[in-house]
């Protein structure tokens, strides 16, 4: 029994990482209706920027805020410069663009900061949380920040004009334009916000996994999986999805005999695909109604 | 009797014969295979500059810088080295393509220090069929020491199995009742190591009470550590690559689990693993080494390391001297240069292998005192010795004797 | 909770390729064919090896073109089918001593079944969800290949070494050249088959599903059957490509069939022109040669250079090589009129 609770707690701790990333994934999906493969790399790059600022003497929170601003601006810049020209191109071409962006960011980060791992500080400390040796204060902090972000996003989308405009621009662009919403800039704004959220995710994840250019590769896949499981239209679902994936993966690794440990990831993904087959919009997503 | 033209001709002929018999060696034996000329030696190399193992690309960069230094100092027996290094992204099909390109298109004399067990396995048959040296491969897999079946392939670093056996011997002696837990990477590196550990324990392999494997695609191995702790083990063996070794050290400290912690040599670098993980978390960790650590102040005045640091300052100033891979590249390149120097003017591929297989007590600048390179026609494992070390304060303390992890093949 | 409404009269995710432009004209086809046949006689063995890989990846991209360009199903999982085909050939050749040529139809058949079966649960997924499911398949495959259970057959993480066949009947040509012509014949056969498939009734059914699935179903097309059939055919062709690849490279290992391969094939499809079968070889050339070019330009930034080149290509020709061909055809037409 103790092993079981331990694995659940450990799963929630890892799941916090996935939940963070999943929020950024959902954010970009809200804006552009597809998944951006380069999301993880952008988050990694932002984290490196904050690390570099701290190397130059900027204190943690100063670096954190500067990085947020930089990421927001950077996200908008990337969208305006690289993806606005592709707006009329087929979706698949856009996906190729994401892949190209991934390659560029990863390579540049490797050149500037090389591939040795770097320690990244956490404002939450690393001692056992509430005496539990399974969740550290940092991981508890991570969960806390993710939940705060989630609430902030909820308020943004439900109760602010811009949030409403973004939702409109994403789901019914024609009608949105008719009421005067500049859909093009809504997309740019979405990119900026997704980049900023991604940078927060990166800065929270780096203390656990150590900072290096390839750190987000695995995390991104889990982030996608968690977002899809929870429902791509629901930030709340993304966070729950993250925790579910973390817990399920751990339990699968522990309790499925023989192959459980080696096939953790495929089993988790198989679960998600099964859920999708039953509930195509994810656990908390809004069902899609197709009109011919 | 001897008319005009004949006499000078005969004298000339006599002179030639006299000359040939005295300088016989140099003049008669200038032999080349493709890739070597009077002025140039072409060396090929395959490294993962991109992809999942890109952290090791720095080895190729260090080697290129070392060969630049050798060229600046006059080259090898007056010949300049042309070092051609290609990226295979750690993908075996790409490695095959690059190997063929080097041999058939770039026409190199040999391929030096190609990295990665999958990539090297992929090109091994081709290299041996083509009779091109696959020299000093950058992987610790045990199978490279097989001169009978693969006479053109040779390793360099101590094999993973021999290192693991050293730990097994140590444990059986110092902690005979230990309950061992193992975390290993689920690839050729991890599995080879684990085999060595189990073989080394022999009948007492049951000392291992828990094993956890992980994939490099996992963001963190924290939950594996939690599981291993729950097994009640008091020894933790970390068969991990740098990032995951650091994560393990950190997690162990976080959950306040203090087993006897052994970490594999590939992750023993102070700069790449211990420092990021935290010195305070790493006290008492055991490992083994065959090379000196650039971060260890005890080598600051060591003549070999001084040469190494001077080299870095002049030819590779951007390199991180705390990175074990940089030290590795230097040592391997120095070994290559030694072999080529021994070849003299006989730069055939056969002679290259012959010289590589007859190194006796060669000590590159960066190996530990007492560890030397020895090869023979039946022994294609250049470095077989390791010394154990314990982390104390901010550096590794070597202890015990230099142990040979020799495996009978 | 309001439902998200999606009007299916919007532009479909995958755009149609006009029937006329689906293949190369007869003249151009013959020229290309002549080049492919004659080239090996003039170049070194290594180049012949690269050309063989060009054909192999071209086949894999072709298969993806049928699936995505033809039936509109997004797949990032082709590397899984390629791996299954490769390992099937390798295992049959090395463990059972089977003749290499025989392993290919078997690899193709096994992958066809595998693809067909995978297509079943995939029926309920589309767009980004299908992408994730196929992505999951591609990520799972290397893990499965490493599994201890199968190690006896697959060689586990060490992989299997494959023996390259000699030319039959003692013909005096090199192994590379023989393998190239063997691959060329198979490629041409599959190309002709694919073109005919897309022009046939089944092909039209695929394209109807791609353009408007609901309308297609309303017209009486058995959507489920054709979608899974598309997956099966695509997987089968990819499996044959995988088998040929294994023979050419002479080695199979889990590290050779990662998600990177799936992404490369996808890029090959986009650069060649989605749904345009002749573009498959252009796409294949892109994914084989451009990384080499990028490496030549800058070793440290090879990934960045590759990304930049890719961006340039998709900015200039968002519809891939097909666009280039259309422009060329257009200009030729103008010249002819004069």
Image (cartoon, coloured by chain):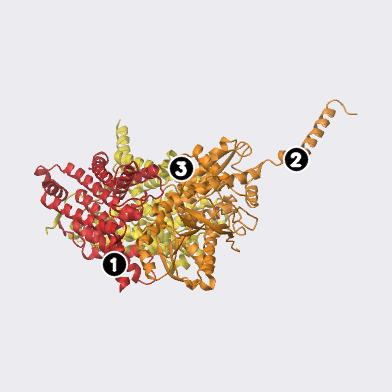
Q: Is residue B237 visible?
A: yes
Q: What is the crowding at mark 3: few (fewer than 14 residues within 10 Å), some, or many (at least 20)? A: some
The chain drawn in yellow is C
For disc 1, the chain is A
> Residue A107, relative to residue A224: is it above or below?
above
Mark on residue C97?
none
- The residue singled out by tag 1 in the image is A8
Colour chain B appears in: orange
* Discs 2, 3: same chain: yes
Question: What is the distance, in whole Å, between disc 1 and disc 2 at their CAs?
Answer: 78 Å
Dots 2, 3 in contact, CB < 8 A:
no
Q: Which structural element holds mark 3?
A: loop
For disc 2, the chain is B
Please state which of residues A232 and B333 is positioned toward the viewer in this rendering. B333
Q: What is the crowding at mark 1: few (fewer than 14 residues within 10 Å), some, or many (at least 20)? A: many
Question: What is the distance, in whole Å, between disc 2 and disc 3 at their CAs?
Answer: 45 Å
> Residue C20, relative to residue C127: is it above or below?
above
Residue B277 left/right relative to B315? left
- The residue singled out by tag 3 in the image is B319
> Residue A255, relative to residue C269: is it above or below?
below
For disc 3, the chain is B
């Amino acid at each position: 029994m103790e092993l079981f609770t331990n694995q659940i707690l450990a799963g929630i701790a890892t799941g916090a990482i996935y939940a963070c990333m999943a929020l950024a994934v959902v954010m970009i999906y809200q804006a552009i209706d597809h998944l951006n493969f380069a999301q993880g790399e952008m988050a990694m790059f932002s984290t490196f920027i904050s690390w570099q600022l701290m190397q130059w003497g900027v204190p943690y929170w100063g670096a954190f805020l500067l990085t947020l601003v930089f990421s927001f601006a950077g996200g908008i810049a990337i969208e305006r410069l690289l993806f606005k020209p592709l707006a009329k191109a087929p979706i698949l071409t856009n996906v190729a663009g994401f892949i190209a962006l991934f390659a560029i960011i990863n390579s540049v980060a490797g050149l500037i900061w090389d591939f040795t791992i770097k320690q990244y500080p956490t404002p939450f400390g690393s001692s056992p949380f509430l005496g539990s040796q399974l969740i550290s204060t940092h991981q508890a902090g991570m969960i806390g920040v993710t939940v705060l972000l989630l609430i902030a996003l909820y308020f943004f989308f439900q109760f602010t004009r811009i949030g409403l405009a973004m939702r409109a621009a994403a789901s019914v662009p024609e009608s949105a334009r008719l009421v005067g919403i500049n859909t093009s800039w809504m997309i740019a704004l979405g990119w900026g916000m997704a980049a900023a959220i991604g940078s927060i995710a990166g800065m929270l994840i780096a203390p656990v996994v150590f900072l290096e250019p390839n750190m987000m590769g695995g995390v991104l896949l889990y982030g996608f999986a968690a977002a899809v499981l929870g429902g791509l239209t629901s930030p709340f679902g993304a966070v729950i999805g993250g925790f579910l994936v973390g817990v399920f993966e751990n339990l699968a690794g522990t309790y499925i005999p023989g192959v459980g440990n080696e096939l953790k990831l495929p089993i988790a993904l198989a679960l998600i695909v099964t859920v999708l087959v039953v509930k195509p919009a994810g656990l908390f997503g809004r069902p899609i109604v197709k009109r011919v | 009797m001897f008319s005009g033209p004949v006499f000078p001709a005969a004298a000339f002929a006599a002179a030639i014969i006299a000359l040939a018999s005295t300088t016989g060696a140099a003049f008669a034996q200038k032999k080349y295979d493709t890739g070597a000329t009077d002025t140039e030696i072409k060396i090929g190399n395959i490294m993962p500059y991109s992809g999942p193992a890109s952290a090791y690309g720095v080895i190729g960069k260090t080697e290129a810088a070392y060969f630049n230094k050798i060229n600046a100092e006059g080259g090898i027996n007056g010949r300049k080295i042309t070092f051609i290094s290609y990226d295979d992204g750690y993908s075996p099909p790409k490695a095959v393509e690059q190997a063929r390109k080097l041999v058939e298109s770039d026409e190199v004399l040999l391929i030096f220090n190609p990295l990665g067990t999958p990539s090297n396995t992929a090109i091994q048959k081709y290299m041996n069929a083509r009779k091109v040296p696959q020299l000093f491969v950058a992987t610790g897999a045990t199978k490279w020491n097989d001169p009978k079946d693969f006479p053109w392939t040779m390793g360099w670093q101590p094999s993973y199995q021999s290192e693991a056996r050293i730990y097994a011997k140590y444990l059986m002696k110092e902690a005979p009742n230990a309950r061992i837990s193992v975390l290993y990477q689920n690839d050729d590196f991890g599995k080879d190591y684990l085999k060595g550990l189990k073989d080394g324990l022999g009948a007492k392999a049951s000392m291992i009470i828990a094993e956890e494997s992980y994939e490099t695609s996992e963001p963190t191995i924290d939950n594996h550590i939690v599981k291993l702790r729950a097994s009640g083990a008091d020894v933790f063996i970390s068969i991990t690559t740098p990032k995951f070794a650091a994560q393990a050290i950190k997690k162990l400290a976080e959950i306040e689990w203090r087993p006897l912690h052994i970490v594999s040599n590939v992750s023993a670098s102070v700069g790449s693993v211990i420092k990021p993980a935290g010195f305070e978390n790493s006290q008492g960790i055991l490992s083994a080494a065959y090379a000196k650590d650039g971060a260890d102040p005890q080598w600051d005045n060591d003549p070999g390391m001084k040469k190494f640091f001077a080299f870095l300052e002049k030819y590779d100033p951007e390199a991180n001297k705390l990175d074990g891979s940089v030290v590795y590249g230097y040592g391997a390149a120095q070994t290559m240069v030694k072999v080529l120097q021994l070849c003299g003017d006989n730069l055939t591929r056969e002679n290259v292998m012959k010289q590589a297989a007859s190194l006796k007590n060669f000590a590159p600048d960066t190996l530990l005192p007492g560890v030397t390179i020895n090869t023979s026609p039946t022994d294609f494992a250049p470095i077989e010795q390791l010394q154990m070390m314990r982390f104390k304060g901010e550096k590794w303390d070597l202890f015990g004797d230099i142990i040979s992890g020799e495996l009978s093949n | 909770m309001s439902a998200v409404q999606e009007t299916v009269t919007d532009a479909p995710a995958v755009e149609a390729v006009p029937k006329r432009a689906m293949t190369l004209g007869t003249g151009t086809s013959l020229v290309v064919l002549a080049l492919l046949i004659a080239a090996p006689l003039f170049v070194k063995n290594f180049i012949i090896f690269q050309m063989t890989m060009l054909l192999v990846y071209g086949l894999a991209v072709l298969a993806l073109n049928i699936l995505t360009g033809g039936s509109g199903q997004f797949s990032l999982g082709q590397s899984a089918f390629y791996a299954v085909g490769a390992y099937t050939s390798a295992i049959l050749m090395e463990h059972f001593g089977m003749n290499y040529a025989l392993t290919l139809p078997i690899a193709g058949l096994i992958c066809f079944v595998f693809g067909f079966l995978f297509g079943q649960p995939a029926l309920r997924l589309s767009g980004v969800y299908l992408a994730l499911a196929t992505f999951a398949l591609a990520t799972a495959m290397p893990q499965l290949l490493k599994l201890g259970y199968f190690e006896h057959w697959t060689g586990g993480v060490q992989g299997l070494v494959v023996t390259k066949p000699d030319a039959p009947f003692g013909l005096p040509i090199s192994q590379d050249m023989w393998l190239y012509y063997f691959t060329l014949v198979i490629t041409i056969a599959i190309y002709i088959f694919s073109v005919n498939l897309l022009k046939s009734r089944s092909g039209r059914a695929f394209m109807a599903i791609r353009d408007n699935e609901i309308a297609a179903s309303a017209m009486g097309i058995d959507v489920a059957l054709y979608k899974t059939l598309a997956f099966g055919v695509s997987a089968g062709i990819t499996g044959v490509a995988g088998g040929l690849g294994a023979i050419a490279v002479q080695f199979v290992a889990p590290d050779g069939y990662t998600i990177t391969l799936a992404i490369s094939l996808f890029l090959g499809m986009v650069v060649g022109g989605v749904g345009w079968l002749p573009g498959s070889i252009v796409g294949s050339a892109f994914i084989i040669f451009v990384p080499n070019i990028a490496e030549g330009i800058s070793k440290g930034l090879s990934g960045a250079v590759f990304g930049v080149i890719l961006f340039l290509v998709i900015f200039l020709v968002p519809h891939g090589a097909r666009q280039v061909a259309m422009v060329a055809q257009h200009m030729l037409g103008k010249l002819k009129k004069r």
